[in-house]
Image (tube, rainbow, N blue to C red):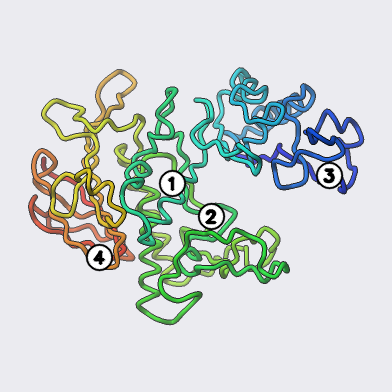
Amino acid sequence: ILDVVYNHTAEGNQLGPTLSFRGIANESYYKLGAEDPRYYADYTGCGNTLNASAPKVLQLIMDSLRYWVEEMHVDGFRFDLASALARSFHDVDMLSAFLTTMSQDPVLRQVKLIAEPWDVGSGGYQVGEFPPLWTEWNDKYRDCMRDWWRSEVGVGELGWRMSGSADLYSSEGRRPYSSINFVTAHDGFTLRDLVTYQEKHNEANGEDNRDGNSHNRAWNSGIEGETDDAGIIELRRRRIRDFLTTLLLASGTPMLVAGDEMGRTQRGNNNAYCQDNDISWIDWELEDWQRELFEFTRTLLTIRREHRVFRQRYFFQGEPVREGGPEDLAWFSPDGQLTSGETWGAADTRAIGMYLAGNLRSRTSDGRPQHDSSFLLLLNSGHEGVDFKLPGRPYGQLYRSILSTSDPIPVLAQVENHSEEVVHVPAFGVNLLEVTKH
């Protein structure tokens, strides 16, 4: 996947250098101010916005994209500030020349298309609004999971985000994989820094810590920055495993930033684009806990790859796929009962169980139903441990623990738990259990 930036150029605003397009046909290549064309319409935060609706600009972009596919054989693209490309005149338009041409191009419509579905202009936030061929960075998933794992929200939105964000993507024939789930990206904190710092520390960037986002939805786990407090260190590492587990086992398409799988830090810098040094580099000299985290991530990826239930092709319906079976998706309170509407609406709910039935709505190429194991994912974002009672039939009679974020190295349980038995989930913890008998 190639990250492409067709929304602006290095010529900047009206005070920037004249390098190419400004001197060739300024009024054709750029979107100009509606009231005073001396100035640029800046929807990118970089001084100018390329006019993707102009025929020659659109041809330039399409020729470039087709070159990367046909000659360089890339599998697809992630479009930086895609909303800026979709603007007709000055409004975002899902029938714009750029999006319409992409949908009709016989080469480009066949590759993976990922939108960063916003820009910095008015009306630029378009999460859930791109056409069916497109997938999107889902920042609602990011914000919800960051808030959940710092005890700031209840389960109301969590249910949508863990199950593929049907509220955003189920219209117009889109599927769960349209949601690109992520917790961190190239901008902002690394995953390790997200649980280590509450405030940005960008002093090394030379702007007196004014640059970078100040609203990071981060919690430092008790102390700002690195510490030798064993309890806080253990909590931070468990929370990293929590984030990885909910990311890699949620419906949708997970996106993991390089280095997060082994605890990379930028020492609290959340805007390190300007740092070509050890602040932004990956340190391959790993400590023991980082090697364990790497193996933990590999285990999660193996579970996801081997079990289709974590790679849903269709949205859940909350109803049985087969007559007499369990619902395809069910949510449980710690008492082993189905979650009530009151619990869904409570802002202080910190523990919930997510049941995924092995009877899938997807089918094989010859039309046969697909089956998998059923799983129960127990989530606790509270400051105290919680005892979960395992649900009985039709959901399961026997359960086996597959993974717990309280264990740095996943240990497959040798003893099965019967329904109605209690499983303890520690504070800020996740347990994954496989149903071995229905």
Q: Residue at x 43, y 65 (%)?
A: 291
- Give the mark nearest the N terminus, 4 or 3: 3
What is the CA distance from the residue labelled 3 to the residue labelled 2? 31 Å
Kindly tell me whether residue 406 is visible in this rendering.
no
Total of numbered circles in the picture?
A: 4
> 75 above or below 284?
above
369 with respect to 288 (left or right) = left
Residue 56: % across, % down: 79, 24
Q: Amino acid at mark 3?
A: Glu
The residue where tag 2 is placed is 258
- Give the mark nearest the N terminus, 4 or 2: 2
Which of the two marks, 4 or 2, is nearer to us in this view? 4
- Give the mark nearest the N terminus, 1 or 3: 3
Nearer-the-camera pick, 396 or 136: 136
Which quadrant of the rendered structure holds the N terminus?
top right
The residue where tag 1 is placed is 141
The residue where tag 4 is placed is 426
What is the CA distance from the residue labelled 4 to the residue labelled 3? 54 Å
How many residues crowd mark 1 within 10 Å: few (<14), some (14–19), many (20+)?
Answer: many
| Quarter of the view holding residue 214 | bottom right
Rendered image: mark on residue 11: 3
Kindly tell me whether residue 379 is visible in this rendering.
yes
> 16 above or below 323?
below
Which of the two marks, 3 or 2, is nearer to us in this view? 3
